[in-house]
Image: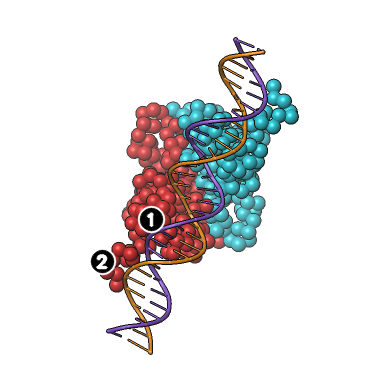
Chain colours: A red, B cyan, C orange, D purple
DNA sequence: ATAAAAACTAAACGCTGTTAAGATCAAACG
DNA sequence: CGTTTGATCTTAACAGCGTTTAGTTTTTAT
């Protein structure tokens, strides 16, 4: 057990460094992060992180994994109603909300130069949010379950993910609002996005298209 | 006029640096690029680029603008048939082909920390490929011309762009093939992607969905 | 021919991630 | 209980980065 007064040994430096890096990225994106800055925030020397994470990449990989779990929590809390249409819209909105709440983390997640994609935990953790979305799309398409061996199902899930991923990216980079009239563009997230999602996932009862 | 034998003055250093940076990014992505490496490749000192571009960001902005023009050329050469369905598929395939041909440039184009989005040329140049795609989508939807003041049209264009942007991103990050059976995944670009695009943009004659 | 402007170099500054060697503390063991 | 072992962290250094300053060379303009 770590003593509280000891200054040489931190106690739980590993967790402290992850939190410091997470905060830095939340505050100013990846540009703000540096290994030395994270070390300083945790109150240790610049060389301390090496022993716990090997490299800056190792530390950022932990932050990225946390971010994947975080977006999954966004999705988990978004849609569990008995209405598949409302669900898929809510999940989509939640995903885009996440990217706007955590732009730095969103960008980090897809920086293969900063994150260890070979990490054994990565494939599982990073796929989870996408799968959650895929299930919602499948339910919207009135399919009981997705069979990825069935080409049409896999293509549905892939395209659904792609659209949302791209949409989130375009919104984040402020390239989405330009497509709309000023009134909508001014507050696109609140005024335009819900309508876009309604357009993307219309109720199919009477309106077949 | 620059004399050929003068070693002190380069002649057209500006163009040479852009080409050097472009090559570096083509060879090994943004990780390979550094201002000093580009300067060395052009045969000048590390401080020389500053006078022409101000900063590394300035140089990379030029490379990014060239990349936008390049993807536009890919699209231009892809689809001008009399068949809107074939066109939109060909344009989509061309866009994804570009990202696979030039992954480093594709990633650079969306790095707002490396590219001057405020550059007056940027908004026009970067919007051009998207608009070309939007027109194809509109033609596919059997609309004579897109009226961005009409919400449905704008949403169509935005979602079309988003899907392709996301699809390209997923393919590039090798997250797309996992959705398909091994046989297709093995050579996804050739075997899976065309079928995905057919799924995404089906012929609407007898098949309304 | 001379003055002014442009293009480039050399050297330095502060920053980065990483490494090597040494100091410190916690825990395990005889 | 004292000693030893191993983990943890520091200090100091290295190479590389983008950028700045001051000075040198070449071109251009007067």
Q: Is residue A108 left or right of residue B170?
A: left
Q: Foreground residue, A5 or A118?
A: A5
Element under disc 1: helix
Q: List the residue tagged with mark 1.
A: A39
Element under disc 2: loop
Expressed as whole percent of the image width and height from the top left, the position of residue B36 reads 58, 42
Chain letter behind tag 1: A
Q: Foreground residue, B56 or A103?
A: B56
Expressed as whole percent of the image width and height from the top left, the position of residue A120 reads 49, 65
Earlier residue among tags 1 and 2 = 2
Quarter location, residue A61: bottom left
Residue B16 lies, with reference to residue A169, above or below; the image says above
- What residue is at 41 percent from the left and 56 percent from the top? A46
Q: Is residue A78 left or right of residue B180?
A: left
- What residue is at 63 percent from the left and 59 percent from the top? B186
- What residue is at 56 percent from the left and 54 percent from the top? B174
Expressed as whole percent of the image width and height from the top left, the position of residue C23 reads 38, 66
Q: List the residue tagged with mark 2.
A: A4
- What residue is at 54 percent from the left and 42 percent from the top? B108
Check the picture and name the quadrant holding the N terminus of chain B: top right
Residue A203 visible in the picture: no
Q: Foreground residue, A97 or A117?
A: A117
Quarter location, residue A172: top left
Chain letter behind tag 2: A
Q: Is residue A183 left or right of residue B14?
A: left
Mark 1 neighbour density, 10 Å: few (under 14) some (14–19) many (20 or more): many
Check contact, mark 1 vs mark 2: CB within 8 A.
no
Query: Residue B168, which numbered label?
Result: none
Expressed as whole percent of the image width and height from the top left, the position of residue A168 reads 44, 44
């Amino acid at each position: 057990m770590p003593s509280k007064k000891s200054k040489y040994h931190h106690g739980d430096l590993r967790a402290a460094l992850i939190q410091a890096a997470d905060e830095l990225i939340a505050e100013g994106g990846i540009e703000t992060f540096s290994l030395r800055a994270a070390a300083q925030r945790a109150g240790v020397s610049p060389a301390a992180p090496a022993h716990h994470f090997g490299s800056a990449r190792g530390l950022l990989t932990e932050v990225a994994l946390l971010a994947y779990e975080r977006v999954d929590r966004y999705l988990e809390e978004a849609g569990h109603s008995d209405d598949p249409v409302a669900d898929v819209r809510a999940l989509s909105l939640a995903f885009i909300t996440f990217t706007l709440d955590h732009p730095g983390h969103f960008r980090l997640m897809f920086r293969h130069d900063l994150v260890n994609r070979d990490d054994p935990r990565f494939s599982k953790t990073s796929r989870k949010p996408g799968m959650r979305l895929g299930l919602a799309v499948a339910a919207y398409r009135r399919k009981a379950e997705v069979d990825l061996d069935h080409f049409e199902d896999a293509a549905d899930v892939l395209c659904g993910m792609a659209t949302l991923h791209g949409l989130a990216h375009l919104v984040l980079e402020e390239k989405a609002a330009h497509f709309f009239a000023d009134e909508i563009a001014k507050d696109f997230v609140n005024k335009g996005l819900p309508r876009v999602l309604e357009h993307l996932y219309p109720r199919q009862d009477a309106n077949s298209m």
